[in-house]
Amino acid sequence: MDDKRQMTMKDIARELGVSVATVSRALSDSPSISRERRQAIQQYAREHNYFPNVIAEQLRHSRRNPSRAIGVIMPEMVHYYFSSILDGIETEASTRGYHLIVAKSNESYAREVQICEAMLKNKVCGIIVSQAKDTEQYDHFKHLEAAGVPLVFYDRICPALNASRVVVDDYMGTMNAVSHLIETGCKRIAFFGTSMNMIIGKNRFNGYRDALYEHGLELDESLVRICDNRADAERITPPMMRTENRPDAFFAVNDETAIGILSVVKRLGFAVPDDVSICGFTNGFRATVCDPMLTTVEQRGSQVGKEAADILIGLVEGTLPADHAEKRIVKTRLVIRGTTRHP
Amino acid sequence: MDDKRQMTMKDIARELGVSVATVSRALSDSPSISRERRQAIQQYAREHNYFPNVIAEQLRHSRRNPSRAIGVIMPEMVHYYFSSILDGIETEASTRGYHLIVAKSNESYAREVQICEAMLKNKVCGIIVSQAKDTEQYDHFKHLEAAGVPLVFYDRICPALNASRVVVDDYMGTMNAVSHLIETGCKRIAFFGTSMNMIIGKNRFNGYRDALYEHGLELDESLVRICDNRADAERITPPMMRTENRPDAFFAVNDETAIGILSVVKRLGFAVPDDVSICGFTNGFRATVCDPMLTTVEQRGSQVGKEAADILIGLVEGTLPADHAEKRIVKTRLVIRGTTRHP
DNA sequence: TAATTATATGCAATCGTTTGCGTAATCCGA
DNA sequence: TCGGATTACGCAAACGATTGCATATAATTA
């Protein structure tokens, strides 16, 4: 059993009767140290399994080299899309020799600010972040940029900052999905989206609108609702289904909402997809659990994560110019299952 | 816009014409510095938003003080139970002033070893870990312990190490669930579990067996199967349902498997729960998505995470004796929904 | 007024590495 | 045998903070 204290270069130096500088050079294979000494030192180090103290290394290099820690801020953790993204970030970061410091904001602005400070103190080399819902001031992000810490946004983008970002192709994703509904015979397609002042909400709505236009259908405002969770969906849907001119399809902004619609529509006695078609957005766990299984737009969270990490590392390593905001769009994919008719 | 280089005590000292030592003492509110100087220095620091370099602080204190970084190793990330646990760890750690370095092993032994080394190098103060499936050697864990890095296991426990751990009460959870099935009229209850050489598998099986005994039912070996995923469940279930003496209930080791059973049983034309009752284990997202909703044992991942973090921090801070292995069991809770009859 | 004590500050070592520079020792050719 | 190049190493100053100890000044006491 080793002693608790880690072995240092000083120990090696003392033991082998050389200076610390020599040990340092020998371990980094400097040719200015004679072959025999170098090997002796390396062997000794190996046998006593010495390894360098990163803290000291970092301190020495703090002027030039950034650390290899990437900060990741998520609004919540128990969430299919976010954990996919984290997975993607981890994959990309670890293969490129970086590690992750992960924190969740709980959708709280105050906590988000705290986290940013803590990460700055802990010398992360950059931060990948999705904003908390109630964040409306951006000084904490600006401070980070001023301190030279690159920022990459995903999912929820900071509108006030021209920062690097990666988002999914909400517009095309929705357009394809709605086109699919139309092409399988649906005429009155309801749209359950988020508030239009979120970029994501607007893009999806535009995709919906344009798909209708392209197919020569009119947009009926009464079919467009703000609704992005199951409870609301279960409340809003029944009255719509009881109207004279009921929808024959629903496009929902996420799988959860789609599931809500599905469950309530079935309860009302409609057949899915024969009476009503339903399409979601995410393609998470839920999509294959409901009955029938959900047709949905795959959001490819892990790809989003990978791209975000790739951008950040590029920024850190200088492959990407620090002043340029890299913006990437991850393509979505329509996964057709049982809640829509087949073409 | 600030310069990129962070301000240091030296800068403050130069600017105010005092020594670095004085700045250090003033900022830590030492009474040995005169009130005026102290305030002047503090004000200057505040105005130029100086903050200490943790790297340097850590180096200075490395002998006595551990870092405040907790390493977390997960076999995978996109998984309800694991992300709940991560959520719990984050919550507990962040409120107690620690941050998380998260890595995933991808169920690979080699990667797990790498991660342990990297975390040791990065001076985490301790590690919370669930073993990869193919880990059968434990030297990397032993090295960590030898180096004085406390370890806390969750979910998948290292059998060869007498380390601290937190697990859910698989035995009672299963026992209660099976009792519920019996008390709602089921007589022939199938058990879909994992391999018996995993502790978790054995405990759940024992709970099943003892629930049967306590209610005077016999254990029928033909109803006990090894099956812990949806695909297998969909393959194994139909033949069972076609036998003369078909089961009238299923207990599955996780929700995913239960969903597989549910979907196939419905397809075969049985009514759930009237013909067949089904109970799962996890209570993840899936449980409320299927139709009918799944009766299941809630695993309380976030509680597991909190307990794990609590133990680790106790170990690090010395509240818990370093040589003692703290073992905690998180109670489960039966959530009765639509796949079983009501009592 | 001289001696004593408090008060406020600086010096310098330390944490573990890295690295520019200086310098013995060795080697080479003439 | 001597001057110059080469080789192989050590010294010491960083990196940014902390802290035991010494000390200069000021305040107190006899």
Image (spheres, coloured by chain):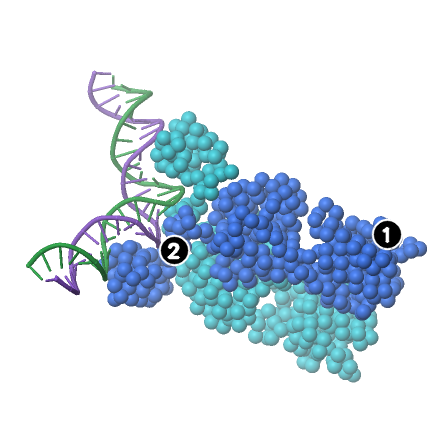
Chain colours: A blue, B cyan, C purple, D green
**Where the C terminus of chain A falls, by quadrant?**
bottom right
Residue under the point 86% across and 52% down: A220
Are dots 1 and 2 in contact, CB under 8 Å?
Answer: no
From where the camera sits, is residue B339 visible? no
The image shows residue B45 at horizontal and vertical percentages of 46, 34
Q: Nearer the viewer, residue B266 or C27?
A: C27
Same chain for labels 1 and 2? Say yes or no. Answer: yes
Which of the marked residues, 1 or 2, is nearer the chain's N terminus? 2
Front in this rendered view, residue B250 or A36: A36
**In the rendered image, the vertical position of residue A266 relative to residue B11, given as above or below:** below
Task: Give me the residue at 65% from left, 41% from top.
Answer: A136
Q: Position of residue B334 (x, y in %)?
A: 70, 62
The residue sitting at 83% across, 59% down in the picture is A215
Residue located beneath label 1 in the image: A220
**For the N terminus of chain A, which image quadrant?**
bottom left
Q: Quadrant of residue A338?
A: bottom right
* Rendered location of residue B8, percent (x, y): 42, 39
Q: Which residue bears the numbered disc 2?
A: A53
Query: Circle 1 marks a residue in which chain?
Result: A
Asked whether the viewer can see residue B29, the reply is: yes
C-alpha separation, residue under disc 1 versus residue under disc 2: 65 Å
A34 sits to left or right of A176: left
Q: Chain of mark 2?
A: A
